Image: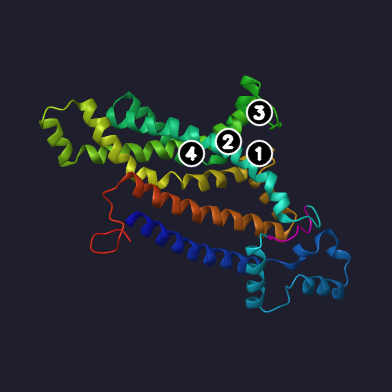
Amino acid sequence: MDMLKYSIGRLLRSLITLFIVLSMVFLLMRLMPVEGYFGARGDNMAPEVKEQILKSLGLLDPWYKQLVSFWGRLLHGDLGESIVYRRGASCASIIGPKIATSFRFGIVSLLIQNIVGLPLGVLMANKKNGVVDKLGNVYILIINAVPAAVYYLLLQLGGSNIFGISMIYRPGDVSTMILPVICLSLGGIATNAMWMRRYMVDQMNMDYIRLAKAKGLSSKKVAFSHVVRNAFIPMAQSLPRSIIFTLAGSLYVESLFSIPGMGALLVTAIQRQDNTLVQAVVLLFSAMSVVSMLLGDIAMVICDPRIKLTSGKGGRV
């Protein structure tokens, strides 16, 4: 019952957050130049024609009327129509296939991040100051110090010149997915390894670990029965949030490898000043961010039943 009450409470707060975020994004988009609503024809349009177009789009109404109208359309699944990218087509029909492509790359990347990053953090903590720990820290330092665009380009050029992998993604050719997936995975591997190592080292210094060892439990059993399990609890909260960071990283990777996904779509829509399409993509990214935070909180509570789910002193609210 407590779990249900907590989940409902978190869901309601997430919905409120989502309402505020989407409303702010909508209003901020109204600060963009209106030329983005006319497309390439804007230079040859008379002022009266431009005004008529803006009026038909409801952009001359007061901001609060526009916001009410926006939420009315959004609740019915209407994200508006593209003005430049594919004139007259609904934004939902344009975004749909792009989401499928981005999620295909994103899911594979997330699996690699967790399969490689979490065990690497465990090995680094167990072999603290050893060879694995030192090499892992060098890797983490490089990934965090070097701009992502730099090692993306190095991987693209190196993979193409040394291994003969295509620099451009081709649908249906699995080999062309290798370099983009690696690019999307490197940052997540470093982040997961770094935090898993930190949480495990913190747990190893706890009194209950010293007590377990004093009772004669082997270091291996203590590490995997207690340390890893407790260190994973805070990681469980951050893992769903890595979804949005992976998708954010795809903004550059998809453009670099010519992948027809959400990231490349957003870049193209901004370049062409298709304001309606830009708004739809940004709204979708915002919604995914809020949902991933909700999933992270619920995942942590599921992993750690000791967390109090009701408000009160020392409880989680």
User: x, y percentage for residue 47?
Assistant: 85, 74
In this rendering, the answer to whether 86 lies above or below 160 is below
Image side of residue 112 versus residue 127, left or right: right
Q: Amino acid at mark 4?
A: Gly
Mark number, residue 176: 3
Q: Indicate the quadrant containing the C terminus: top left, top right, bottom left or bottom right.
A: bottom left
Visible residue check, residue 31: no
Q: Position of residue 132 (x, y in %)?
A: 34, 25
Give the mark toward the camera: 4 or 2: 4
The residue to which callout 1 is attached is 256
Q: Is residue 262 visible in this depiction of the protein?
A: yes
Separation (CA) of disc 3 from disc 1 = 12 Å
Q: Is residue 207 above or below residue 67?
A: above
Counting residues from the start of the chain, the first of labels 3 and 1 encountered is 3
Alpha-carbon distance for marks 4 and 2? 11 Å
Q: Mark 1 and mark 2 in contact? Answer it, CB < 8 Å.
A: yes
Rendered-image quadrant of the N terminus:
bottom left
Q: Secondary structure at mark 1?
A: helix
Foreground: disc 3 or disc 4: 3
The CA span between labels 2 and 3 is 15 Å
Tell me if mark 4 has few (under 14), some (14-19) or many (20+) residues whose alpha carbon lies within 10 angstroms of its own: some
Quadrant hosting residue 69: bottom right
Element type where label 2 sits in the image = helix
Q: Residues within 10 Å of mark 1 (few under 14, many from 20)?
A: some
- Marks 2 & 3, CB-CB < 8 Å contact: no
Query: In the rendered image of this protein, does residue 30 appear above or below residue 169?
Result: below
